[in-house]
Amino acid sequence: MLNDLTLTELGARLRDGRLSPLDLEAEARAANTHGAYVHVNAERSMLLAASADAAFSAGVDLGPLQGIPVSIKDLYGVPGFPTAAGSPRRLPAAWERPGPVVARALGQLAVVMGKTHTVEFAFGGLGTNPHHPTPRNPCDPETPRAPGGSSAGAGVSLAEGSALVALGTDTAGSVRIPASWTGQVGLKTTRGRWSTDGIVPLSTTLDTAGVLTRTVADLRVAFGALDPEAGEDIEPVEVSALRLGRPDELVYDGCSPGVAEAVEAALGTLAARGARVERVALPEVNEAYALFNVGGPVATELYQFLSEDLPAWLAGLDPNVRARLAGAGELPAHEYLRRLRAMARLAASAAERLRPVDVVVTPTVANTPPPLAEIATPEGYRAANGLCLRNTGVVSYLGLCAVTLPVGRDAAGMPVGMQLVGRPGSEPRLLAVAAAIERALAG
């Protein structure tokens, strides 16, 4: 199968003529079997593949994503596709215009396979949406389980092979959760590193554009293709030179059976290969989690956006999204500003605490992907949603960047992700650390 090759290997074959973008597109299109997409356009994806093929034949190389199948979350504006942001109706045409992230992918003649499912307006971590069928998590062929959200189709598209790179967004975990629950790799960028123009907003304070891939090695290729500071070198590091911080606060507590154990086992392997694993105090986690639990700025910012820009969409919201917006329009201005000040204070403090280590290591998601039947009630949904967002949400509230990579299976046989957390703006170093860890755990 062509999707067993790395992006680097595929790129070499595309460029020397051993592989055609048309063949790669056809194989990816045939793999669309788990409901990852809300919109597909086979004619358009084949046309993009033909354009990439013609460019290669003419000796034109526009970048690492040329000819590569890419899925794009249905929050991004993409020419030729409607944008609905997980809602049951098409948004105004202004939201179909591409922003800088999509423009960089299209400028390299990436092959867009379609728009992937999202939780309505990205406000949820489980990946469900009553307006559209929930993508099926490919990692359990027997029991329908949550795919993770809000980028619900992104991880599924990679796991099934219908895309090799997936564009998502991450406000409180929406790249990292689906990546973790489907056994993929995902990057949550530092706020502001990648533009969110051309992306339907959830939170003007916390929204980030992000990317999912099958491996860290692939992520480094995708990051180099999409990052506006792509000239910045990602220097290799050895695992024996790493200092890994393991916090005691909250993030290892209350995990599903096998989740924390898989991460601890990975840390043990890394320590055996020479990494220094040390306890770190990160008390900011507890206060950030308290802010998260009262909605932080997110619910109020989404309510403001919908009320001002899309008021006709409010009445038909997913009941789970509507429940999380309860009271958001009544938050006093002084409380909203207090939360923003608290987040800024905590972020500055947390960034300083991370200085002695290369990364802080946590389970990406505390709970196993729940069967859809267990989250069909408001009570079941609320409990599972809150727990799945906990470890990723506090990282977002602390203004940090993070990568998740798979490190094993939990007691239910589902993938477990390990979250590597870095200081703001440290993405190149974070990816080098993640690559060293991936190599060490594979060998």
Image: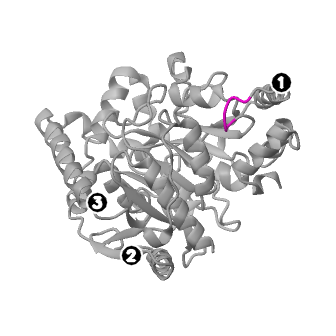
Crowd class of label 1 (few under 14; some 14 to 19; many from 20; radius 10 Å): few
> Left or right of 150: which side holds 193?
left
At horizontal 21% and vertical 47% (from top left) the residue drawn is 343
At horizontal 85% and vertical 36% (from top left) the residue drawn is 22
294 in relation to 280, above or below: above
Q: Horizontally, is 53 left or right of 71 in the view?
A: right
Give the mark nearest the N terminus, 3 or 2.
2
Amino acid type assigned to the residue bearing label 1 in the image: Ala
Label 3 amino acid? Answer: Leu
Q: What residue type is disc 2 on?
A: Arg
Residue 62 belongs to the span the image colors magenta: yes
Residue segment shown in magenta: 61-65
Residue 376 visible within the image: no
Residue drawn at point x = 85 percent, y = 28 percent? 57
Residue corresponding to mark 3: 354
Q: Which residue is mark 1?
A: 58
Q: Position of residue 75 (x, y in %)?
A: 52, 33
Q: Which residue is mark 2?
A: 276
Of the residues under marks 3 and 1, which one precedes in the sequence?
Answer: 1
Q: CA distance from mark 2 to mark 1?
A: 50 Å
Vertical placement of residue 176 versus 52, above or below: below
Residue 154 image point, x, y percent: 60, 47
- Residue 166 screen position, x and y as percent: 61, 44
